[in-house]
């Protein structure tokens, strides 16, 4: 289908643009705000060209309508404005992606259209991936009534710990998404096992321990999630090689996955669950250091997680704020 362009402005403006654009585009034309808004909603053009010369109130109103509507927020706008720095600034601040002179040179006009279409192709893909992320993560949280808010807290705690560790923005973003997605494989685990209020049998444990691999398999086809796969797959490894699914040892266990894991355990043991009574912040950090003494975790990273939990005010401080243990009293489960 031909690229659809909406030209919004008076007849002279539309004519000059149509001439510069030449053939190869499907052109829609609107003279006023209402007409432009109707066309945008009904036909969803790929790009809108607006006449902002002389600070046109009509043009400004059209830009305002586009930027104000959730369904049109991502619709790219190219504005024709007077060739002064002030007019350019006003057009960009109003919400235009590109500002060009008038009449626009044909070559430049076509190049700007190509540029906007490239950007849009990329954001379309991102939007799809984000929708999948949230839909699946919500489905997992819905399976487990006791872990409400878990994934969001784990992500936030991991990002803060990573920031304190001096890790780059990209890794922090991976951890934020990893927080949301790390347990997505639980979607393949029966509810009786996820919500069991006691010790898991050996058989049940084997099933439960499959969730990192199931999660990895779910996310694998999405290109935009590929950098998260190590975090999802390895969030239950241990530094001494006794974790699952791969039994990674020492430096084989990547630091981002370690941070996600510590944040995950911290949140699991500081929140109320059917199989244990929650710990205070201090007790949770002691618990993690105890696991580091066994060779499973890293003391230095635990200190960062403790600081991050303090910065974000996650976990309760006073023992008396924590409800009594549920019955039957089970094992500490940290998946
Ligand atoms: Fe978790
Ligand atoms: Fe897990």
Image (cartoon, rainbow, N blue to C red):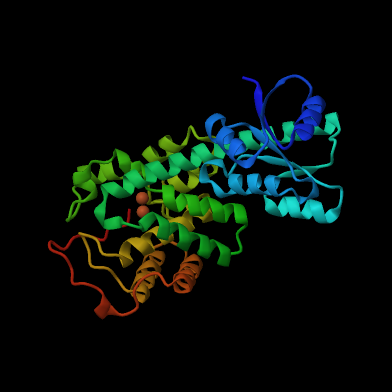
Which image quarter holds the N terminus?
top right
Left or right placement of residue 47 versus residue 330 in this view: right
Q: Position of residue 135 (x, y in %)?
A: 39, 42
Q: How many numbered markers are drawn?
A: 0
Viewer-closest of 99 and 314: 99
Q: Position of residue 50 (x, y in %)?
A: 71, 40
Whether residue 93 is visible here, answered yes or no, is: yes
Say above or below: 58 vs 46.
below
Viewer-closest of 19 and 282: 19
Q: Position of residue 193 (x, y in %)?
A: 21, 46
Seen from this angle, which residue lies furthest left? 328
Q: Residue at x 76, y 51 (%)?
A: 55
Q: Position of residue 170 (x, y in %)?
A: 60, 52
Quadrant in which residue 316 is drawn: bottom left
Left or right placement of residue 255 versus residue 297 in this view: right
Whether residue 202 is visible here, answered yes or no, is: no
Viewer-closest of 192 and 252: 192
Q: Residue at x 55, y 43 (%)?
A: 227
Say above or below: 203 vs 108.
below
Q: Residue at x 36, y 57 (%)?
A: 150
Left or right placement of residue 330 versus residue 245 in this view: left
Q: Residue at x 37, y 76 (%)?
A: 282
Viewer-closest of 75 and 214: 75
Left or right placement of residue 232 versus residue 207 in this view: right
């Amino acid at each position: 289908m031909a690229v659809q362009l909406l030209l919004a402005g008076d007849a002279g403006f539309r004519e000059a643009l149509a001439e510069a654009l030449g053939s190869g585009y499907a052109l829609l034309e609107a003279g006023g705000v209402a007409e432009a808004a109707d066309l945008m909603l009904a036909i969803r053009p790929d790009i809108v060209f607006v006449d902002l010369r002389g600070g046109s109130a009509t043009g400004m109103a059209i830009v305002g309508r586009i930027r104000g509507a959730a369904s049109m927020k991502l619709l790219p706008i190219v504005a024709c404005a007077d060739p002064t720095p002030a007019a350019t600034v006003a057009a960009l601040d109003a919400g235009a992606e590109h500002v060009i002179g008038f009449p626009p040179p044909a070559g430049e006009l076509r190049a700007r259209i190509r540029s906007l279409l490239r950007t849009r192709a990329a954001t379309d893909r991102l939007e799809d991936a984000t929708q999948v992320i949230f839909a699946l993560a919500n489905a997992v949280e819905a399976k487990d009534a006791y872990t409400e808010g878990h994934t969001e807290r784990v992500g936030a705690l991991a990002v803060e710990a990573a920031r304190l560790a001096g890790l780059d923005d990209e890794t922090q973003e991976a951890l934020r998404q990893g927080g949301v997605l790390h347990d997505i494989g639980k979607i393949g685990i029966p509810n009786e096992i996820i919500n069991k209020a006691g010790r898991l049998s050996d058989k049940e444990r084997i099933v439960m321990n499959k969730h990192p691999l199931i999660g990895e398999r779910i996310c694998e086809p999405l290109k935009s999630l590929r950098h998260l796969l190590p975090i999802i797959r390895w969030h239950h490894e241990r530094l001494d090689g006794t974790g699952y699914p791969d039994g990674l040892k020492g430096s084989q266990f990547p630091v981002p996955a370690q941070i996600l894991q510590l944040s995950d355990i911290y949140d699991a043991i500081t929140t109320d669950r059917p199989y244990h009574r929650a710990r205070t912040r201090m007790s949770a950090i002691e618990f993690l250091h105890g696991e580091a003494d066994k060779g499973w975790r890293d003391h230095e990273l635990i200190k960062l997680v403790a600081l991050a939990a303090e910065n974000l005010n996650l976990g309760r401080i006073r023992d008396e704020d924590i409800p009594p243990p549920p019955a039957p009293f089970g094992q500490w489960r940290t998946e």
